[in-house]
Image: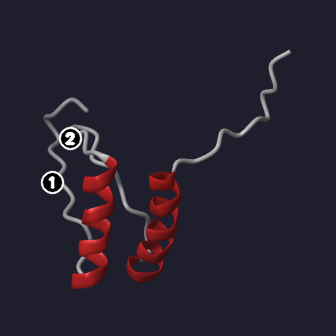
Amino acid sequence: MIDLNRKPKKSQQEQEFDALNSEYIKAFGEPYVFDIGFPASWDEVLEDIKNCLTTGKPQKKPKYEEDMTY
């Protein structure tokens, strides 16, 4: 029988992301958002969050364009 309530173990990078994202939320009032069109690696995401926290500047979000299909 399949246990649908089973939660797989998180990787070290996922655990680090959770911790950094908590700090990011405290600093900027919203969670870090993954860019759907740009598949970044865990290392790139973690580095970007660390950079945001160090510089005090939130991540750059792409401009929403009404004529685009998302």
Residue at point 25%, 33% (across, down): 70
Of tags 2 and 1, the one toward the viewer is 2
Q: In which quarter of the image is the N terminus?
A: top right
Q: Position of residue 17 (x, y in %)?
A: 45, 60
**Which one is in front, 45 or 62?**
45
**Which one is in front, 58 or 69?**
58
Residue at point 53%, 58% (across, down): 15
Instruction: Give the labeled residue for mark 1.
Output: 63
Q: On the image, which quarter does residue 7 sit in?
A: top right
Looking at marks 2 and 1 on the same chain, the residue that comes earlier in the sequence is marked by 2
**Which one is in front, 27 or 19?**
19
**Residue type of the residue flagged with mark 2:** Phe
**Residue type of the residue flagged with mark 1:** Lys
Tell me: 20 left or right of 62: right
Q: How crowded is mark 1: few (under 14 residues within 10 Å), some or many (20 or more)?
A: few
Tell me: 67 left or right of 61: left
Q: Check the image and report above or below for 28 versus 2.
A: below
Q: Check the image and report above or below for 62 versus 3.
A: below
**Helix, strand or loop at disc 1?**
loop
